Amino acid sequence: MANLFTRPDTFFGVCEALGEDLGVNPIWLRIALGVGVLWQPLAVIAFYLALGALVLALRLLMPNAKGGEAASAPMSDAANDAETPVLATAA
């Protein structure tokens, strides 16, 4: 995956990164951010920049924090075959 902070389709990638970390669709975070900017633009922009600094620090300190089991060695083909259900064949 490309670096969230250098992608051309995001603005620092803060909502995208928080969405990944929290398991939330980043669109909802962007909508909340947009609505917040309508009422308190300076406070929301300051909050967004603070979250950006936090996300950057966490990504630099713990680059591969999630996906511990997924990064382990892949299962052998025999183990995969044992877990694959047998489907009946049609005539």
Image: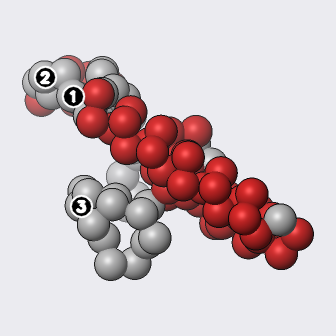
Q: CA distance from mark 1 to mark 3?
A: 18 Å
Q: Position of residue 65 (x, y in %)?
A: 33, 26
Q: Quadrant of residue 53?
A: top left
Residue assigned mark 3:
2
Residue assigned mark 1:
71
Q: Position of residue 7 (x, y in %)?
A: 30, 70
Residue furthest toward the front?
A: 42
Could you tell me which residue is drawn at 40 percent across and 78 percent down?
A: 9
Residue 18 appears in the figure: yes
Residue 70 appears in the figure: no
- Secondary element under disc 1, as helix, strand or loop, is loop
Q: Position of residue 42 (x, y in %)?
A: 72, 65
Residue assigned mark 2:
73
How packed mark 3 is, by other alpha carbons closer than 10 Å (few <14, some 14-19, many 20 or more), is few
Which one is closest to the eye, mark 2 or mark 3?
3
Could you tell me which residue is drawn at 34 percent across and 59 percent down?
A: 4
Q: In the drawing, what numbered circle is on residue 47?
A: none
In the image, residue 50 above or below residue 33 = above
The residue under label 3 is which amino acid type?
Answer: Ala
Task: Say whether marks 2 and 3 touch (CB < 8 Å).
Answer: no
Task: Say whether marks 2 and 1 touch (CB < 8 Å).
Answer: no
The residue under label 2 is which amino acid type?
Answer: Ala
Q: Quadrant of residue 79?
A: top left
In the image, residue 1 above or below residue 10 = above
